Amino acid sequence: MTGTTGGPLAKGVTRSYSFAMSIMNSLRPGGRHGLSSRETRDPIGLAVAAVNRLAQSDLIDRVGLRRQTEQVVYSTTRNGFRVATAAGRQFARAGRRTAGARPVTAESRGVFDLTPTDDESMLLEVVRELADELLRPAAAAADEACAAPDEVLAAAQEVGLPGLGVPDELGGIMEERSAMAGTLVAEALARGDMGLAVATLAPGAVATAIGLWGTEAQQQTYLPAFTGTDVPAAALTIAEPTVLFDPFSLSTTALRDGDGFVLDGMKSAVVRGADAELFVVAAMLDGTPALFLVESGTAGLEVEADPSMGVRAAGLSRLHLSGVRVGADALLGDTGGAAYAECVRLSRLAWCALAVGTGQAVLDYVKDYVNGREAFGEPISHRQSVAFMVADIAIEVQAMRLLTWKAASRATRGQDFAREVGLARQLCTEKGMRIGLDGVQLLGGHGFVKEHPVERWYRDLRAVGVMEGVVMV
Amino acid sequence: MINLETPRKHAGLADQAHQLAMNMLRPISRKYDRAEHEYPKELDMLAALIDGVSETGATGGAGAGGVRRDDAGADAGKVRNGANLASVLSVAEMCWGDTALLLSMPRQGLGNSAIASVANEEQLERYKGTWAAMAITEPGTGSDSANITTTAVKDGDEYVINGEKIYVTSGERADSVVVWATLDKELGRAAIKSFLVRKDNPGLKVERLEHKLGIRASDTAVITFTDCRVPAEDLLGSPEIDVKSGFAGAMATFDNTRPLVAAMAVGCARASLDLTRDLLEQAGVVIDYDRPAQAQSAAAATFLRLEADWEGAKLLMMQAAWMADNRLPNSLEASMAKAKAGRVGSDVTLSCVQLCGTLGYSEAELLEKWARDSKILDIFEGTQQIQQLIVARRILGLSSAELK
């Protein structure tokens, strides 16, 4: 490069100079390609980056991927694709704006007990079968495709999972508040696969929220769709793609506008965003977080694929809201933040249950692996360094389970469970990730390749401390 | 129905134990930490109080109900919250007061727990009211308790015991000692039996007391047995050497005592958490269970991590006791509880000292004491590593020959 002119690279640099100038802004370091904003690009660096851009677009031309097709075919496997949200169905307005029906809380005999009720056991039997027979075999392909197969979603609907948190007088399946049943179900599903568990539980999160905090009108308008035969994709969206995200201090805003509200902001961890027909969006209203029901056909909504480290089968997306106008009847729950706080806690509870289920999957898998794998003439499980890792997985997964169950049982009885769920989330985040990490380590190189599911569980378990919203019990 | 709260029927008991711990143990906690080997005379009064509590169906000390499963009553098939849950809850409360003083509680020794677990009906009646220490460990044998060298040789209607035992908790203060000895070294663990030896037996001698890192208020003795003759009826359980059932009988005691040691760690660690939370709040750090830990101060985030681990230990402890109450085999869960509580006890108490700086390190507060007291709880009744070994063998389905 020193002093020479007319070389092929220099020519390329000249030709692409104006192009490079035009994309200067997008080439500024900071957050893109894993670069911190402390990095700087000198002119040579900028030129190289520009050439690289051109090379990439050449490649795209060669394989025939035209921009137009990209815009039409929404892909969940690559980020950056933005389309309008689904046109969605018309939810026929019904009912009055008075308080809706509420599930009754369960009574306790005051006896310490770790036995599920008969109803819960029966439900679990069905869900375990679903997890073993359907979710686990479909998991690898769904992870690859960043989408849940139709038959899995249909089976979940058939079992009635979307209506699990809905009072039976509104067409749901449980007589009482079902946070405990929901927790057991989420745990059992995640033992099959966390990504597919999230995909199948997402509509239920929205239905449960409407069941818990909806007005009579909101319940009459939306719940029939969730307890019927054609359950819509729906997403409970709380998270935002910012560092140190705090769900009690959101960037998304709701401004009062006449009778209704105008929503602006960006939401992440939106399950099946392009298919979703109904969103519950968390936004700050007068400085306090609140929940809003937003139908997918509303103007100002755009969805962008956001494939992430794991939980890929859930088709994670981002939802952009620009000047989204909704009516007064869109507000779900109170404006004092009480319903919202409960929503955040119940959602974290569901994530804890998912962590327990996936942690159990890791334990079951490595147990067999270390007993079967031989090194130095005997199974590696005969070595304490290996066996003790397995013991610790067993101990911690049970501790995670008990904390999660305690929080869930308190929620079911209508007791305050802020402390319990806070501690459960802390433990499930830390120990859950440790279990994912050790799961891969125990398989060595075999754990790093996709021939075994432990690398997927490793990626999925990182979600637990990161996610807010999405699922709820 | 799943419910992990303190059982309604035991709530009063736990409150009582808490009040005893606060008002009788805490005021003398530092005094007997400093005056190692001095007898805490206040405990005699407390023991009388505890006896009153015991009458109501639960005991306050380490020598709790044992693992007897012989009281299948009218409510068979119903979920039971019984003596085991009551014991772990009250032991945890008492250790919140002071672990060493709990261990020094008259008539509540670990030997009492062994008696409750393996003695026959006649023995139970005969030993009523005794204060029994437990003597297993020898100078050359710690965790490997199947390898003890103390011998018991049958001679007419008596056994003659010879050997040296160390780390006998309450070895000086108790009025009897449950001793593990082998009838025949060749036959291995199946030949190990436990014997109740009265302290006034001329063949028994308390050689010395240990100076320790923590639990100083509890005396830890070295005891020698020299041609120590005990009546044959003081052999606990069956005198037969059953090679098949092997060590199971003797080891069954641990299914009962391990949740109790877990309870000690849970109680001791909660003392640290309670005080540290208070000190942090005075310094303006309030723990918020809703906001993400990483959005709070580092001290609050650390505290949340400690409390979550602690809650896990406590619930594993309750699970193990609940299983015993419902006559479910609980060896695995007892070891899980002991392993988790042991390591969490150390982590919590040591981290609380760190959070509180020189205030925590100073004898002006009790935090440094709790950080010393907690260490033994990850060692006695089976170290952390022994618990991991037990859990691993159970989970992986391996024998002690396969997973050494």
Image (tube, coloured by chain):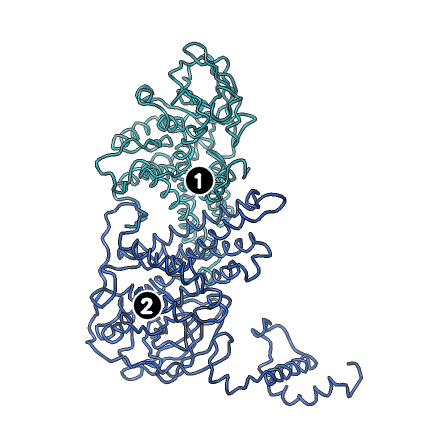
Chain colours: A blue, B cyan
Residue A459 shows up from this direction: yes
Q: Which residue is farthest right?
A: A3
What is the quadrant of residue B85 in the picture? top left
Residue A386, image x and y in percent? 55, 46
Q: Quadrant of the C terminus of chain A?
A: bottom left
Distance between the Cα atoms at labels 2 and 1? 41 Å
Residue B329, image x and y in percent? 37, 38
Q: What is the three-letter code of the residue carrying label 1?
A: Ser
For the point 23% across and 34% down, the residue is B73
Label 2 residue SS: helix
Q: Which residue is mark 2?
A: A157
Count of numbered labels shown in the rendering = 2
Q: Which residue is farthest top?
A: B156
Residue B136 numbered tag: none
- Same chain under badges 2 and 1? The reply is no
What is the quadrant of residue B234 in the picture? top left
Residue A286 shows up from this direction: no
Looking at the image, is B51 positioned above or below residue A259? above
Tell which subunit mark 2 falls on. Answer: A
Pick the front one: A362 or A356: A362
> Are dots 2 and 1 in contact, CB under 8 Å?
no
Looking at the image, is A448 positioned above or below residue B104? below
Pick the front one: B238 or B228: B238
Looking at the image, is B261 positioned above or below residue A12? above
Residue B335 numbered tag: 1
Q: What is the three-letter code of the residue carrying label 2?
A: Gln
Tell which subunit mark 1 falls on. Answer: B
Residue A156, image x and y in percent? 35, 66
